[in-house]
Image (cartoon, rainbow, N blue to C red):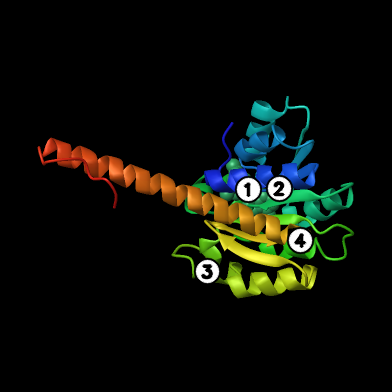
Amino acid sequence: MQANFHKNIARLITDIQAEFEVPHFVETGTNVGQTAEWASEHFDDVTTIELDDDLYETAVSERGHIENLSIVKGNSTEELGPVLADLHGQAVVHLDAHLGGKWLASAGDTTASEDFTECPLMDELDAFKGLEETHYLFIDDARVFTSPRREPFNPDDWPSVQDVIHKLEEVDPDYHVIIYLDEIIAVPPEGRAFVRDRIRTYKTEDREASSRLRRYIMNKVWQHASLSGPVRDL
Ligand SMILES: C[S@@+](CC[C@H](N)C(=O)[O-])C[C@H]1O[C@@H](n2cnc3c(N)ncnc32)[C@H](O)[C@@H]1O
């Protein structure tokens, strides 16, 4: 099963899991459970929280059989605290209960309720205050916090990246915050050098792979045009 994020984010999460033997994965915003199922293949246990009745029912019917996966029905602003309090050990936490365009369409009647917010992130982050463990946080869709959202999203529901970073500092002043690909990642101090080095490696590998691809394409173009020899380097 593939997770709903970039392959390098999936890699980073499994690398963190393996290096620090992180037992738990927690997610807000299950949708139908695709990322949760992926996580269940890599972590001892996974808990995911979904507000919408229909999406919750679909996730349970499609993935309820997975033994190490718990699907919780409810609002992440209320359910996340008790889930975190029950953990023994560290977790990678995927905060993804905020709405994107395609999810806005699939969120059913949920958006009609009075206390619905398009982005519960700031309240979710409050649930991490005062915990014994400092968890690895992956806040999905970084781009929606780095600049205002388009219409029809409600601008009052969305914190800025600055608000998010201030809140993370309140949770743990030692958090190291990185924005990589489409994630805001909060890394506990002991993981800082590891995460930095992993991301450097992925970037170097991606750069080499794209150089190889460029050379390959240019060689094909030159050969096709019957020009003298292959392009050796670019
Ligand atoms: C972006 S989708 C999640 C995608 C999923 N994490 C994945 O990777 O496949 C957002 C989901 O969050 C749910 N949601 C929105 N507000 C929520 C809240 N306050 N608590 C829990 N779930 C919420 C929506 O119903 C929607 O299913």
Disc 2 target residue? 16
Q: Nearer the viewer, mark 3 or mark 2?
A: 2
* Tag of residue 12: 1
Q: CA distance from mark 2 to mark 1?
A: 6 Å
Between discs 3 and 1, the one toward the N terminus? 1
Q: Residue at x 60, y 43 (%)?
A: 10
Residue 199 appears in view: yes
Q: CA distance from mark 4 to mark 1?
A: 14 Å
Q: CA distance from mark 3 to mark 2?
A: 25 Å
Q: Is residue 225 above or below residue 160?
A: above
User: Contact, CB < 8 Å: mark 2 with mark 1?
Assistant: yes
Q: What amino acid is labelled 4 in the image?
A: Pro
Q: Nearer the viewer, mark 3 or mark 4?
A: 4
Q: Position of residue 219 (x, y in %)?
A: 23, 40
| Mark 3: secondary structure | helix
Q: What amino acid is labelled 3 in the image?
A: Thr
Q: Nearer the viewer, mark 3 or mark 1?
A: 1
Is ligand 1 within 8 Å of the beta carbon of the residue shown at mark 1? no
Q: Residue at x 46, y 62 (%)?
A: 152
* Tag of residue 1: none
Observer-nearest of 81 and 43: 43
